[in-house]
Structure formats: structure tokens, C-alpha cells
Amino acid sequence: MEKIIVRGGRQLNGTVKAEGAKNAVLPVIAASIIASEGKSVLHEVPALADVYTINEVIRHMNADVNMVGNTVTVDASNVLETEAPIEYVRKMRASVLVLGPLLARYGHAKVAMPGGCAIGSRPIDQHLKGFEAMGAEVTVGNGYVEAEVNGRLKGAKIYFDVPSVGATENVMMAAALAEGKTILENCAKEPEIVDLANYLNKMGANIVGAGTETIRIEGVEKLTGATHTIIPDRIEAGTFMIAAAITGGNVLVQGAMHEHLRPLVSKMEEMGVIIQEEESGLRVIGPDILQATDIKTMPHPGFPTDMQSQMMALMLNAAGTSVITETVFENRFMHVEEFRRMNANLKIEGRSVIVEGPSSLQGAEVAATDLRAGAALILAGLVADGYTRVTELKHLDRGYVDFAEKLATLGADIERVREEEVYSEDHEPSESVSTL
Ligand SMILES: CC(=O)N[C@H]1[C@@H](OP(=O)(O)OP(=O)(O)OC[C@H]2O[C@@H](n3ccc(=O)[nH]c3=O)[C@H](O)[C@@H]2O)O[C@H](CO)[C@@H](O)[C@@H]1O
Ligand SMILES: C=C(OP(=O)(O)O)C(=O)O
């Protein structure tokens, strides 16, 4: 087992670059298998565990996939298998995003039913409702969801009960190749949905309105491979913005796009952080004293749930009482117990957490309960007294490339070590054991 060990007290300064967005690249790679002709060439693909998993999923289906540096090439012109077994879906829920492309191209798709996870129950009823409205017969049984249609899917008018990111993406991909016009209402509006629509349009699709509540899709008969550059990861960028702010540092986060990060920027500014737009990204300058604020997570353009735990770390260092209300996932407070191990003063009240700051955080051994929790605990460790040891790094690796290494470049006292190489409380970890 590996751990990240961070010693608090260093101010972060310098420049860091956001990778391509995890939540954009996963649907884009899933969509690449819709193309019955031509290769897709995808640039700015982050070297994340989740990317390796989605590549494995489509390779298992007989697509040719190659990753060289940050470029992925997909040739899906072979005849594909239309099944994704449990081993992939267990590793990564986003594997369900192959349902729409397979169903549209082959009239059949079978994917292991994703269960709940550490942040909530996460049903896929809205994905299935969309496929059924387009004429598919959907059956759920023996741990699988299977969708089938005779001939092509038919365009339909579909109203999502909740603005789900995954359902909007899955149904939009299916509709791209359906017969006739589809109108999707109450869609999720995340920037990653716009990126997916842009890629599909380059493949020959006819999609308008992505990024708004209503998406209109005129189905086409065939899609072909296309070249596309993935948008920067707003959540990774936001995590580094908080790293700068929490340490009172001055960091330029390259690739951080103001239009994608408006809710975070405005909340951080309310807390006293200075954020300046520069040509290549956002410069974040932390104040001497952070002020308390409140946030409520909401679908985009509301405050992103994927930044909630990192924001909790920042609020723990702010003067006064802050309130976090989580409305997107019902169980996304697992990190509260871990923060408490670091002496954080936090109280859960229903779907809210009351944060009393500033807490005098102390280093402790803590576990990443999900990927953003892992990042948040490391952020807290940057300012805690002594050493914080973060375990369960498999979660962190799903969404962050070289997180510890990038923080070290900015001046953090941090390293990633194997368990057997970890020393006792009062022993500084040695440079020679770093596995970065
Ligand atoms: C790979 C990816 O892009 N992951 C992101 C995506 O996840 P994901 O696409 O799974 O999240 P959704 O937007 O679908 O989920 C939002 C809410 O809708 C509910 N719901 C969803 C689908 C459905 O059929 N029925 C239903 O009730 C969920 O339980 C949840 O409460 O958006 C989430 C919300 O911004 C982010 O936290 C994840 O990082
Ligand atoms: C919850 C997240 O991702 P996923 O939907 O892939 O679990 C996330 O990125 O914070």
C-alpha cells in the first residue's frame, strides 16, 4: 500500500498546469466507438487510472486503442462486442457510458449494472428512460442492464427528471445516430457535455444547444472518427486554486478557465482570496486571513459537488462559521470523520455540515474515502501541524495525475511512499524512499 505524507507549513508558489478533464475524456472515449469508419485522435488526455479503465473497456470490445503520451488514438471500425462486464463497471461507474454508443450503432448493449458508491446510491434510471423513449427495450436482471432495439433508435422528446450529467451524455450519444429528431429537456449543462457535443459534431453529428437546458439532435446515419482536444480539468484546476489559497501562496494555475470556474471563483473571492485572470489561466493569491462563507452544491452553473470536500478544507482555515449544503449526492460527507481525526471542528446536520473555523489542524493518518476527499485531506495536510499520512490512494489516482509531485513542485513538503518505507511519527521521511 502507498501513502502520501505531507508536512504542513509551506507556502505554495509558482505555476502548475491542469490536465485534460477526466469527466470530459471518459464520455469522449466512450463516444469514439460510435464511429464505424476512420480513426479518432484525442489530445490532452490525462494519464489517469480511469482513462486506462475506459481504454480497457473499449479494447475488450475489440476497438483498437493506443495511448502515447497524452494522445489517444481509437479505431472502432472493427465489428465490436456489445457487452461490458462487471470487472470494468466495478472499477469505474463511467463504463455505463458505452451503453448509448453501442445501442445506437448495433441495436444492442449489455453492461453490468453499477451499484452505489461512497458518495451515494447513483441510479441510472434517467439513462434507461431515455433509451426506452427512443424505442429500446430495456431489461435489468442478474446484475446486468441490457438494451435492445429492432433496427435504429427513433428520435424522441425526452424530459429528464433530474439534470444528470451521465444521462444527458448517454442519451445524447444514442440520439446522434437515431432516426429523426430528438429533443432533450432539463439537461445537465456542465462544460464536459459541451465538449462531448463538440466532439460528436466533428464526427458528423448534428447537435445544438449543449450547455443549455434543451439539446436538439438531428440523427445521422453514420459517424466517423475525428480529432479533438479535451478541455482542461476544472476540478483539478480548482483543487490547485485551493492549495494556493489555503497556504497563503501565489500560484498561476494554467488551463483554469474562468467561465468554467465561476462558482468557485466567486466563493473564494468572498473568502478574501485574490483571483486574477491571465492569458494562460488564473492566478490565485491567498490572503493572511480567510473569511467564512456558505456553499450549496448544485448542478452546473451552481457550486460543483466535486469541489465540496476541497472547499471544506479551505473553510476549516477561515475565521468564523461556514455552512456546506450538499444537494447533489446524499452521502458525500465521508471525509468529515477523516477531517475530525485532524482536529477539525465539524458538525453534520442533515445534508449540511457546519464548519467552525479556524481549526488548528493536526497531522494524522487518514484515508481517502473518495477521490476528491483524498485531495481535500492532502490540502488540509498542507497547513496542519506535523505529518499527515493519506492512504487509499487508488481513489486519488482515478482523478489526479502526479498530485503529490505537482504540489512538491510548488514548494509543498510532500512525498509518496510505500507502506513498508514509512517511518515513525517523529522521523522525517527520507528522499530516497520517494516513489514519485
Ligand atoms: C464521470 C463523470 O462525469 N462524473 C461526474 C458526473 O457523475 P454522474 O453523471 O454519475 O452524475 P449525475 O449528474 O448523473 O448525478 C446527479 C444526481 O442525479 C441522480 N441521478 C443520476 C442519474 C439517474 O439516472 N438518476 C438519478 O437520480 C444522482 O443520483 C445524483 O443525485 O456528474 C456528477 C455531478 O456533477 C459529478 O460528481 C461526477 O464527477
Ligand atoms: C465523483 C466523481 O467521479 P465519478 O463520477 O467518476 O465517480 C468525481 O470526479 O469527483
Image (spheres, helix red, strand yellow):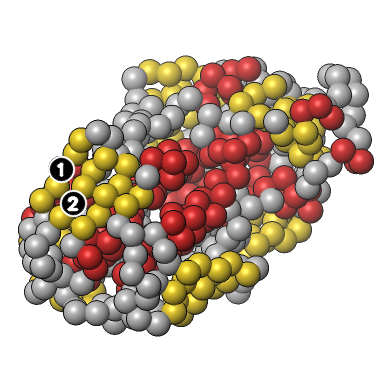
Does any portion of residue 238 appear in the rendered image?
no
Judging depth in this view, the residue of 54 and 26 nearest the camera is 54
Q: Residue at x 69, y 59 (%)?
A: 16
Q: Which mark is residue 306?
A: none
Which quadrant is home to the N terminus? top right
Instruction: Tell me the amino acid under the disc marked 2.
Output: Ala
At horizontal 30% and vertical 57% (from top left) the residue drawn is 82
N-term-proximal mark, 2 vs 1: 1
Q: Is residue 188 above or below residue 369?
A: below
Q: Residue at x 72, y 52 (%)?
A: 406
Residue 316, image x, y percentages = 59, 29
Horizontal side of residue 210 vs 41, given as left or right: left
Residue corresponding to mark 1 = 139
Q: In the image, residue 175 lies at what x, y percent?
A: 19, 66
Question: Cα distance, mark 2 to mark 1?
Answer: 6 Å
As drawn, is 187 to the left or to the right of 2?
Answer: left
- Report which quarter residue 133 is drawn in: bottom left
Disc sitting over residue 147 in the figure: 2
Q: Amino acid at mark 1?
A: Thr
Image coords of residue 247 (percent x, y): 71, 41
Residue 218 appears left or right of 418: left
- Label 1 CA crowd tier, 10 Å (few <14, some 14–19, many 20+): few
In the rendered image, residue 95, in percent from the top left (x then y), is placed at 38, 50
Marks 2 & 1, CB-CB < 8 Å contact: yes
